[in-house]
């Protein structure tokens, strides 16, 4: 039985004739928790948008659950990088989450009993249930980000995409956020874009290094070429870099060819 949830085959895409990807391939298994890392402009967000069906490849194919992305969008949750929201607007955390249950032809203020139950359940999963009635302007950045994830969860997705979800959250908040995501990963496949190498060995299961190409690693490990790709310097220049994982400093610097 094929347990792949995402399959990219010979994928090519360009913006205004400027190539972003050319003939790239990627396979993500059901139940994975994958981090996409790489430099700004390397194509991480573009790759997410292609997998969401918001962009169409110029060549090759994308299959999510064996179908085109737009055909399974109801099984996918998405938290984009830039969420513009007026924090002065008089809505509660619960109101924001309920927006994820909106359907065509229904007013935003009307929700069924099931909608509310699902919204409360999503907030509980993100450990935000006690803040359900709090105005969004009174929430911290980290708490608000959890609310946005809860909004993505109310569609009860099988696959969750997050684009730089902890960019404005302090280190302690980041650890708590990824701990919750790790728990969600028990039932949901997760793909997260991040620049934070510290999360790799502690939370995620695999890594995709994205910079005009895709190098997939089926284990949470920092390699020499990942660092070269992200920081545009040689392995020798960054060998002193150490990562704290499970309370212990260590280096893991292998090339893609060694894997």
Image (cartoon, rainbow, N blue to C red):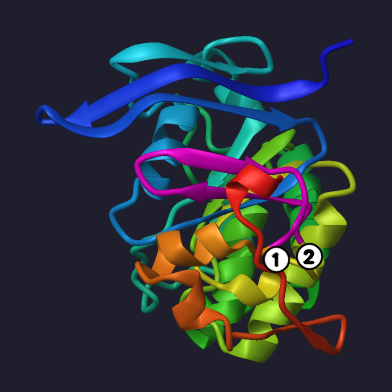
Looking at the image, which is closer to me, 257 or 9? 257
- Name the mark on residue 87: none
Quadrant of res 220:
bottom right
Tags 1 and 2 in contact by the CB under 8 Å rule? yes
Q: Position of residue 159 (x, y in %)?
A: 69, 36
In-image side of 227 versus 134 (left or right)? left
Q: Residue at x 68, y 17 (%)?
A: 65
Q: Residue at x 74, y 72 (%)?
A: 128
In-image side of 63 versus 82 (left or right)? right
Q: Residue at x 52, y 50 (%)?
A: 209
Q: Quadrant of the C terminus?
A: top right
Looking at the image, which is closer to me, 54 or 226? 226
Q: Position of residue 247 (x, y in %)?
A: 86, 89
Q: Position of residue 150 (x, y in %)?
A: 67, 56
Q: Secondary structure at mark 2?
A: loop
Residue bounds of the magenta highlight: 204-221
Q: Quadrant of the N terminus?
A: top right
- Name the mark on residue 200: 1
Rendered view: 231 above or below 11: below
**Residue 213 on the magenta span:** yes
Q: CA distance from mark 1 to mark 2?
A: 6 Å
Q: Secondary structure at mark 1?
A: loop
Quadrant of res 56:
top left
Say which of marks 1 and 2 sits in front.
Answer: 1
In-image side of 218 versus 21 (left or right)? right
């Amino acid at each position: 039985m094929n347990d792949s949830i995402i399959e990219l085959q010979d994928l090519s895409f360009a913006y205004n004739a400027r190539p972003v990807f050319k003939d790239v391939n990627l396979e993500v298994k059901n139940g994975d928790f994958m981090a996409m890392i790489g430099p700004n402009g390397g194509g991480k967000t573009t790759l997410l948008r292609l997998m969401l069906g918001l962009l169409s490849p110029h060549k090759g194919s994308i299959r999510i659950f064996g179908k085109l992305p737009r055909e399974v969008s109801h099984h996918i949750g998405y938290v984009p990088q830039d969420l513009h929201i007026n924090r002065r607007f008089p809505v509660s955390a619960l109101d924001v989450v309920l927006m994820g249950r909106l359907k065509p032809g229904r007013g935003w203020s009307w929700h069924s009993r099931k909608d509310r139950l699902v919204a409360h359940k999503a907030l509980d999963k993100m450990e935000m249930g006690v803040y359900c009635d709090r105005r969004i302007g009174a929430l911290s950045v980290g708490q608000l980000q959890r609310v946005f994830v809860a909004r993505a969860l109310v569609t009860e997705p099988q696959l969750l995409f997050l684009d730089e979800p902890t960019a404005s959250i302090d280190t302690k908040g980041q650890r708590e956020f990824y701990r919750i995501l790790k728990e969600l990963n028990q039932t949901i496949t997760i793909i997260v874009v991040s620049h934070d190498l510290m999360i790799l060995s502690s939370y995620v299961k695999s890594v995709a290094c994205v910079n005009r190409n895709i190098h997939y690693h089926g284990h949470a490990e920092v390699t020499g070429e990942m660092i070269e790709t992200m920081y545009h310097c040689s392995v020798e220049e960054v060998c002193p870099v150490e990562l704290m994982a499970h309370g212990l400093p260590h280096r893991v610097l292998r090339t893609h060819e060694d894997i």
